[in-house]
Image (cartoon, rainbow, N blue to C red):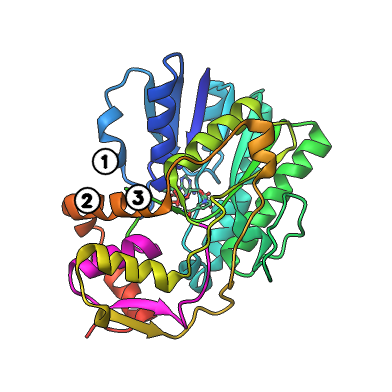
Amino acid sequence: MKLLVTGGCGFIGSHFVRLALARHRDIRLVNVDRLTYAGRGRNLADIERDSRYCFLKADVASSAMFQILHRHRPDAVVNFAAESHVDRSIHCAADFLKTNTLGVQNLLDAARAAGVRRFVQISTDEVYGSISGSGRARENAPLLPSSPYSASKAAADLCCLAAHRTHGQDAVITRCTNNYGPYQFPEKMIPLMITNALHDIPLPVYGDGQQRRDWIHVEDHCRGIFLALEKGTAGGIYNFGMGSEPPNLMIVLEILKILGKSETLIRHVKDRPGHDRRYAVDTTKARKELGWTPLMNFERGLAATVEWYRENTAWWLRLKDAAFRKFYRQNYGRPS
Ligand SMILES: NC(=O)c1ccc[n+]([C@@H]2O[C@H](COP(=O)([O-])OP(=O)(O)OC[C@H]3O[C@@H](n4cnc5c(N)ncnc54)[C@H](O)[C@@H]3O)[C@@H](O)[C@H]2O)c1
């Protein structure tokens, strides 16, 4: 099989590229990434020399995608490329719409023109919005995005479904809950808290910290994506999640405990505007139709992730550069 992956130098994409090449000897893989602040070639340093792998720098929203897909003619496209940080989307929504929505429409058109057999869109459970009570969103739940990020992803999902209905294009959508694990950019909650704690910098917790997310290890998500690629139904949507929802504050306390740091590092800061209180998905369909099941228990996965950031300081230290520090100050205040 020949795969074209976009955004393969980011957090989830790099895990997927590594998993695909490790598990499937017969795969050839083209990774297209614009290398934004969140994408790093070094995330895949261990496979750069694999003759089955090739990297191309390009923007998914550009016309270059037509030439690339025409030249490489992959069997399938798996689209991870995105602007992915909700806080940034609140400050600059246009970048999110350009990559996350127009970029997806451009990729769908280019894939169709090149005769690509399957298009897998990596979406998010955030498209369902905040889930009240103890319910869980199924794949047919209404789309009620709260942030410019989730709105741009919901719009992309609709573009995929429209391409399927209008053109008969084979598109599959995956909607996963919050991921954690190695190589996640240190602006996202779990690595932000770990790296701040390692430096004894205050840990900013939004509002009361009682927002609940269903955290899943990135490798469990990537196994699900591969199953959706192989076994998913054309026009199908698949939720992935663990089914446990620890409040954010509890995760922060657990990170401090693992690192032996004081709880006095916690700073409650003004809540994010439009902050969803709870995400929860029903994963029955992925379990039944794809035979998927998550393997990593959250406590074990979190401890291993903390250990990875502790051992790989060189990976994240440079990322906390001037631009990141500026953004951090603007949104969370100057660390005291
Ligand atoms: N992180 C999560 O918890 C989570 C959960 C569910 C779904 N998702 C989805 O998974 C996908 C990957 O998320 P992530 O956390 O790995 O994001 P990330 O920000 O770590 O990586 C995004 C990658 O896309 C690349 N990229 C950005 N704009 C591009 C463009 N215009 N053209 C080409 N490449 C571009 C970046 O350089 C980077 O390598 C996204 O689509 C996101 O919406 C993420």
Q: For residue 209, what is the image quadrant? A: bottom left
Dot 3 or dot 2: first in sequence order is 3
Which mark lies nearer to you, 3 or 2? 3
Residue 34 in sight here:
no
The residue range painted magenta reads 187-214
Q: Whole-Å distance between the Cαs marked 1 and 2? A: 9 Å
Q: Residues within 10 Å of mark 2 (few under 14, many from 20)?
A: some
Which mark lies nearer to you, 1 or 2? 2
- The kind of residue on which mark 2 rests is Trp
In this rendering, would 81 be left or right of 10? right
- The kind of residue on which mark 1 rests is Arg
Instruction: State whether residue 275 is above or below residue 290.
Output: below
Assign the C terminus to one quadrant of the image: bottom left
Q: Residues within 10 Å of mark 3 (few under 14, many from 20)?
A: few
- The kind of residue on which mark 3 rests is Arg
Dot 1 or dot 2: first in sequence order is 1
Q: Which residue is mark 3?
A: 300
Report if the CB atoms under discs 1 and 2 are less than 8 Å apart. Answer: yes
Report if the CB atoms under discs 3 and 2 are less than 8 Å apart. Answer: no
Q: Which residue is mark 1?
A: 42
Residue 323, horizontal then vertical, whole percent: 29, 67
Residue 79 in sight here:
yes
Q: Which residue is mark 2?
A: 315
Point out the residue furthest to the right here: 166
Residue 77, horizontal then vertical, whole percent: 57, 31
Q: Which residue is rendered at x = 50% and y = 78% of the image?
A: 272
Q: For residue 23, what is the image quadrant? A: top left
In this rendering, would 321 be left or right of 133? left
